[in-house]
Image (tube, helix red, strand yellow):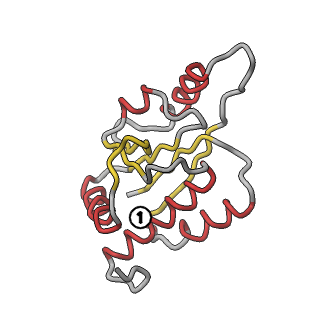
Amino acid sequence: MKLKLLAVGQKMPQWVNDGYQEYARRLPRDCSLQLTEIAPSKRGKTSQPQQWMQDEGKRILTHIDSSDHVVALDVPGKPWSTPQLAEQLAAWQQLGSDVCLLIGGPDGLDPSCLQRANQSWSLSNLTLPHPLVRVLLAEQLYRAWTVLQNHPYHRA
């Protein structure tokens, strides 16, 4: 199984790339995490947030295969504790397909992406900066994997 992180945003600060890579490289090949950056829509005075989200949504959807299990990161989604995320990870591994995790742009995910999603996950009720979400998500996925492996990284 591959975990495919599809995230709107490019040219992240070095600390974001370093933090993300630190945890992504710790995951084993059979649970690898790969990042695909989606260029954000051009924000202009004549266009609206709905147009930007729709444009970004179309580009996100082009990276999703029909067999992929899709998880939208969305504030109204279901919050998971670390043990619950570990359960989700174990369930995803049993699916036999890749898992796409979607991070929208500054205006959120387009309804077309939310409609395609099999699950909706809320990392927090707080509004988190998109660069930080990448690092947080990679760390939490690694932590969930260590729970499943009884690795000492996670000490509950």
Q: Position of residue 130 (x, y in %)?
A: 60, 48
Q: Nearer the viewer, residue 133 or 18?
A: 133
Classify 117 as above or below 84. Answer: above
Which residue is rendered at x = 51% and y = 62% of the image? 138
- Residue 152, by quadrant, is bottom left
Q: The C terminus is located in which quarter?
A: bottom left
**Image side of residue 123 versus residue 105, left or right:** left
- Residue 151, by quadrant, is bottom left
Residue type, mark 1 in image:
Cys
Q: Nearer the viewer, residue 96 or 155?
A: 155
Task: Categorize mark 1 by other alpha carbons within 10 Å: few (<14), some (14-19), many (20+).
Answer: many
In the rendered image, the residue lying farthest to the top is 46
Which residue is rendered at x = 71% and y = 25% of the image? 43
Classify 27 as above or below 42. Answer: below
Q: The N terminus is located in which quarter?
A: bottom left
Q: How many marks?
A: 1
Q: Which residue is tagged 1?
A: 31
Q: Position of residue 119 (x, y in %)?
A: 32, 43
Q: Position of residue 148 (x, y in %)?
A: 31, 74
Classify 113 as above or below 7. Answer: above
Which residue is rendered at x = 43% and y = 46% of the image? 100
In the rendered image, the residue lying farthest to the bottom is 152
Q: Nearer the viewer, residue 64 or 156?
A: 156
- Residue 72, by quadrant, is top left
Q: Secondary structure at mark 1?
A: helix
Which residue is rendered at x = 58% and y = 47% of the image? 36
